[in-house]
Amino acid sequence: MIRLLSRMGPALLLATGVIAAEVLGSAPAAGLWRLAAPALLVLTLVTADLLRTRLLGGPMRVSSPALILGVAILLAGTAIASQDLAGLAAWVPLFGCCAAASVFLRRDEKAPCPLA
């Protein structure tokens, strides 16, 4: 049971981060704190990627896709917030889905090449 929970750690962390970013982004009296929602999502993405890499026995470093997606989320969140601060909350779940795809659909470095 403990092993199963440890393997689910990155997914649970990412799900919690998406929910927290959504709550922060959609709070009615949040004001400029809504800009922190994409930053919280990126922090969660990087942490989940580090945890997943560590659970697979790899080195403690962030993968390139996670970094690229993190920068893209920050830029897109800033661009959306500059147009409509209230509309940012609608985009946070989509950003979270992209983050989950980059972390969990990544090929494992230890897996053999399927073409070889």
Image (tube, grey):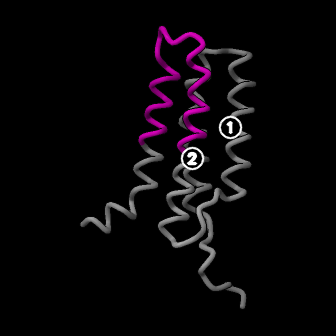
| SS majority, magenta | helix
Say whether disc 1 or disc 2 marks the residue closer to the N-terminus: 2
When the figure is inspected, residue 63 is found, relative to residue 31, above or below; the finding is: below
| Three-letter residue code for mark 1 | Ile
For numbered disc 1, what is the local secondary structure? helix
Looking at the rendering, which quadrant does residue 96 occupy?
top right
Question: Which of 32 and 79 lies nearest the eye of the viewer?
Answer: 32
Question: Which of 91 and 15 lies nearest the eye of the viewer?
Answer: 15
Residue labelled with disc 1: 73
When the figure is inspected, residue 46 is found, relative to residue 105, above or below; the finding is: above
At a point 57% along the width and 19% down the height, the residue shown is 34
When the figure is inspected, residue 66 is found, relative to residue 17, above or below; the finding is: below
**Separation of disc 1 and disc 2 at Cα?**
10 Å
Q: Is residue 76 left or right of residue 12?
A: right
- Residue 30 painted magenta: yes
Residue labelled with disc 2: 45
At a point 60% along the width and 13% down the height, the residue shown is 32
Q: Is residue 86 left or right of residue 9?
A: right
Looking at the rendering, which quadrant does residue 65 occupy?
bottom right
| Three-letter residue code for mark 2 | Leu
Residue 45 position in % (x across, y down):
57, 46
- What quarter of the picture does the C terminus occupy? bottom right
Q: Which residues are magenta?
A: 16-44
